[in-house]
Amino acid sequence: MNDNIKKGLHGIIVDETTISQVMPGINSLTYRGYAVQDLCEKCSFEEVAYLILNKELPNKLQLKKFNKKLEDNRNISTNMRKTLKHMPKKAHPMDVARTVVSMMGLEDKESSNNSPESNMQKAIRIFAKTPTALAIFFRARKGKKILSPKKGLGFSENFFYMCFGKVPSKEIVKAFDVSLILYAEHSFNVSTFTARTITSSLSDIHSAITGAIGSLKGPLHGGANEEVMYMINKIKKPENSLKWINKALDNKDVIMGFGHRVYKKGDSRVPTMEQYFKKVSKIKNDKKLLKIYETVKSIMIKRKHIHPNVDYPTGPTYHLMGFDTDFFTPIFVLSRITGWSAHIMEQHASNKLIRPLSKYSGEDYRKVPLLNKR
């Protein structure tokens, strides 16, 4: 391969951003300069969403107005509700997420308006409505009664209510909030770069987020949290975990939830998410998943020197909260809409069409022979 070709754009800086950065010196991911682990401990998810979209943390009045705007925009159209009820029950929820955001683009009167003001309002509408749509599908495919958004509930509380008909303990809600904060933004990952690439053609925010969801669906990106749970389900019992992981490594199988393109000494988000996984395990009185988790983690570090990424503790945490495995990545979507929206608006503010070159390695120039000579 030509040394000038950087497969996967590895090591290539294609643009600059003010939204987030990985800081190896303090082993932290930062949003607008704030360490994400500090945001997890001191802020709600809504506060962090505001920060990502508006560049600064909100004061009490700003947060109140932001929450009110989210609450006012949670309802979806009657047409979308009917569509969700008639979607194939076996459809992957990521396909549902992709479809409903695209539908929002059809229904939004400002769809083609790419002004900063319009994009901010559309971002808030997408952010507010997508959880409602996914919660409706969560219940519809189980044949359960559809619930409407409930006034007075926060972002995470309302999603739990619409999915399960009740709001769990504050500790569970906080753990969910933390997962959303950790998933909200991560610089030029593949789905974000997809969103920025689509935006660079001066396409609209709904198209860019729809494309980003398609990118996030892959198991090498957002889909990893689902794959982690499928792996744990294969192991079944803690007493099987040591034999299972050693056999998998001997067979050179890919172990999902480990390694990261950016973090070489371990994902800085893991300690925080792992802490809340343990809290949820204790609340749910479940030791099985945690034992499997610890065994697989220790062998991966011991034998391969590869550390877990944030998907590894997040998958079993969502499972303990009661979510279906194929809903793990759609929950990621609910959070990452904030990061994608911020990048889309940043791309519009200083846009240049993203158009890389390719190195041709096919056949040399040749003439088409006549039919009777083929």
Image (tube, helix red, strand yellow):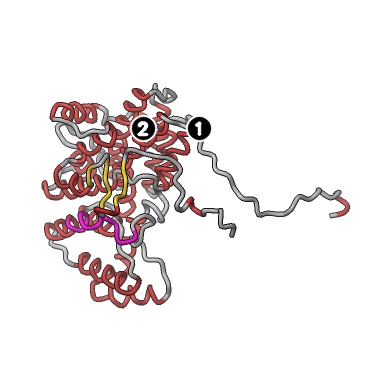
The disc, 2 or 1, on the residue closer to the chain's N-terminal end is 2
Depth check, mark 2 against mark 1: the one in front is: 1
Seen in the image, is 360 located left or right of residue 75? right
Circle 2 residues within 10 Å: few <14, some 14–19, many ≥20: some
Quadrant of the drawing holding the C terminus: bottom right
Q: Which residue is at 84% across, 50% downward?
A: 369
- Residue 114 appears in the rendering: yes
Residue 272 is a magenta residue: yes
Mark 2 and mark 1: Cα distance apart in space: 28 Å
Q: Which residue is mark 2?
A: 80
Type of amino acid under label 1: Ser
Residue placed most toward the observer, 344 or 321: 344
Q: Which residue is mark 1?
A: 201
Residue 274 falls in which quadrant of the image? bottom left
Seen in the image, is 86 located left or right of residue 313? right
Q: Position of residue 329 (x, y in %)?
A: 33, 49
